[in-house]
Amino acid sequence: MTAEVRAIKTPAELALAEAYTAAKPKLPGDGKVIALREAAFRRFDAQGLPNRRVEEWKYTDLRALMREAKPIAGLPDAAAKARAKSAGSLIGDIDVRRIVFVDGAFVPELSDLKNLSPGLTIGSMAQALASGDPLVAAHLGKVAAADDSAVALNTALMRDGAVIRVAAGSTVELPIHLVFVAAAEQSASMFTRSLVVIEKGARAMLVESHEGATAAEHQVNTALELVVGDDAYVDHIKITSGKSPVVHVSSLMVTIGARARFNDFSYTTGNAVVRNQLFLQFDGAGALAGIRGASLLNGRQHADVTLVADHKAGGCQSREVFKAVLDGQSRSVFQGKIIVRPKAQKTDARMLSNALLLSDEAETDTKPELEIFADDVQCGHGATSGALDDGLKFYLMARGIPESEAESLLVQAFVGEAVEGIEHAGLRDALMVNVAEWLKARAG
């Protein structure tokens, strides 16, 4: 007789199951969407919250970090909307088109939907699900394979987000700024799902800002599916900031077409726990991708970047560069995997992770991986961690620069290697200003 072994559900997992059962009748979507949600929740229910026994989550045990599941956020009230008006200011005064979501819901009165560029359409995911939008039906849940329970939970409970389409051959001059604000006074969980389709030969820049506007311990599970068509040119910037004690899990799923160019940059300075996971799929030959990121951490902050770059087509190039600066008892995690499929000959992929520890109590964990099933490729990875170079600091101090300023200059140069990959000069400058402000606050 064989006994069936079942994992014991945690209070958070039981609460999430109850929340899904209660929310099901109110969630937008027709029969196909309902079936998609059901399948996703069954997958989550079988796997449970990601934990250290799952290899990809061994350094960020979400089951341990989420002792309880917060109730799903309701629609934002006037006070929450008022708190969200100044959100996203970290990018400075660059001219953008703001699309605002408060507590996981689209807020039209805070968004700019007037005079859209030719070929550009922007809508709400909740409305698209309710109306059976064909764009959403064609791509939702199909962009890139991600057998991940956090993504499954997002699919089951997704409520709202952005649906953006840039028609073939169109150029969107103004960056699209998606502003996600957790502004409720009481702790809540939020599940946003966005879909962006950039068609053949189109060009666009997408900026995401995620921040908390209160001291509540929110739980955020957000996902973005991005389709980069053949010959398209796409820049994507994700900024996670703010001092709120938020647990933030983000999933980016991207398919990249032939001869396309895709640049991604993730910048993390805020929240208690941040997990940025990226699933990139090179579907077309000759694509170029630059994947970069920087984290500035203090106190007991925890930031995790987990990346899978799956090269399925030949002649593609990818560059991954990630920097982490750690102070206090903070912890950074970088897990990067490059996969080269048998048909992906002539692949050129390189990955680098550097961590700068400003405190003896800070910790960094790095796990680079290569899985290569083709023979005509150039692939490599590297990782370093350590303190500031005393020789360089002495060199600056010997020329009359105070010690604190010398350290700041070295840190800015360290982070700048990743930030300089951003092509938009205004955004690049705004992030470097924020780096300087972070260093000033640390010194103070």
Image (spheres, rainbow, N blue to C red):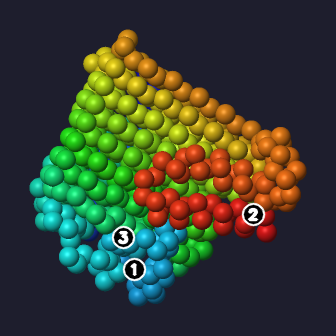
Asked if 420 appears above or below 98 in the picture, the reply is above
Can see residue 45? no
Give the left or right position of residue 436, taking residue 391 as reference.
Answer: left
Residue furthest out toward the front: 399
Residue at 46% of width from left, 60% of height from top? 425
| x, y percent for residue 352 | 56, 34
Residue 160 placement: quadrant: bottom left
Real-space Cα distance between discs 3 and 2? 30 Å
Task: Indicate which disc, 3 or 1, sits on the residue closer to the N terminus.
Answer: 1
Residue at far top of view: 375
Mark 1 residue type: Pro
Task: Please name the residue that numbered disc 2 is placed on.
Answer: 442
* Residue 194 percent across, percent down from the top left: 31, 58
User: Of residues 402 and 261, which is closer to you in this image?
Assistant: 402
Query: Please, is residue 293 above or below residue 206 in the view?
Result: above
Q: Bin the neighbour count of mark 2 within 10 Å (Cα to Cα): few under 14, some 14-19, many 20 and up.
A: few
Which residue bears the numbered disc 1?
A: 76
In the depicted structure, whether residue 172 falls above or below residue 292: below
- N-terminal of the pair, mark 2 or mark 1, is 1
Badge 3 or badge 2: first in the primary sequence: 3
- Look at mark 3 in the image and give the residue it sits on: 96
Q: CA distance from mark 3 to mark 1?
A: 24 Å
